[in-house]
Amino acid sequence: MNSVIHPSGPEPENTYWLRRGIFVVAFLLALGLIWWVLSGLFGGDDRSTVAATPQNPSSLASAEATPSPSASPSASASASPSASASASSTPSASASQTPSQSPTPTPTPSAPAECQGGDVSLSLDGSRSPKIGAGAAYTITMKSEKGCTLDLAKTPVQLAVTSGSDRIWTTVHCPAWAPKGKADLTGGKSFAAKVTWQGKRSHDGCKLDAQVLRPGTYRVSATMDGAEPDTMVVMPKA
């Protein structure tokens, strides 16, 4: 250690210190040269140049103010789908939230069908023991499960009095004796028509015999073409 601090030799001490200084300077220059070569190889000069070169504030401001070309398409691209999505969602949302207000048409009630004879059921009621020579009233009730209207001018109902095969009296001989009009048989409604038998024999043209019928057994029948007839037994008394 003493020889390092105080060199000894045939030459003066300053000479040794001068040599040492030259050696240190040469060593530092060699290190600097090596660093410079390595910096050139690995881009140290570019980084140092960029770092050393000051930037113009005005150029920085213009660079910040001017949008990047790559940013503009991405922004428009990202904005366009959202805009189209909102545009497409708006009509569907409004359509789903707003129900259609189309007015419901009022159905026009249709007129009921016209009854045919087969659509009508007949029932007969009246006096079973009328007095000889006096009139007897009978009621013909008409019903229909079809729910129709019966025009008695087109589909007439008839009442007849018979004794065996002998026809004593009938409304066919006089239309004025037969039921008339139109019967509403809809909704379970029924129609009742009254017919009066004068207690005598009838003929065409609304004519009646003057002779009084004798006591006996007679059959009173209500009939209509196509309908099931209804019959009751009548026994006039003196």
Image: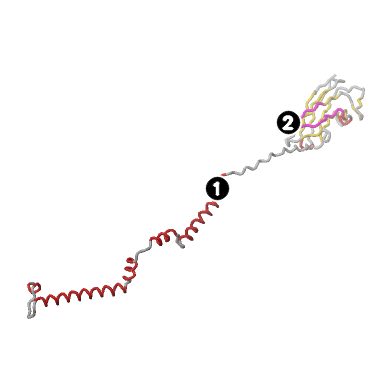
Give the structural element (helix, strand or loop) at label 2: loop
Which residue is at 28% across, 73% downward? 36
| Residue 188 drawn at (x, y percent) | 71, 32
Q: CA distance from mark 1 to mark 2?
A: 54 Å
| Residue 24 drawn at (x, y percent) | 18, 74
Residue nearer the viewer, 46 or 93: 46
- When the figure is inspected, residue 118 is found, relative to residue 81, above or below; the finding is above
| Residue 112 drawn at (x, y percent) | 75, 37
- When the figure is inspected, residue 96 is found, relative to residue 42, above or below; the finding is above
Residue at numbered disc 2: 189
In the rendered image, residue 192 lying in the magenta stretch gets the answer yes
Say what amino acid the circle numbered 1 marks: Ala
Residue nearer the viewer, 67 or 200: 67
208 left or right, relative to 149: right
Q: Quadrant of residue 60?
A: bottom left
Say what amino acid the circle numbered 2 marks: Lys
| Residue 175 drawn at (x, y percent) | 87, 30
Label 1: how many Cα within 10 Å (few below 14, some 14–19, many 20+) = few
Which residue is at 80% across, 32% downward? 182
Span colored in magenta:
176-194
Which residue is at 47% across, 60% downward? 72
In the rendered image, residue 3 lying in the magenta stretch gets the answer no
Label 2: how many Cα within 10 Å (few below 14, some 14–19, many 20+) = some
Residue at numbered disc 1: 93
87 left or right, relative to 222: left
Tell me the quadrant of the picture where the C terminus can be found.
top right
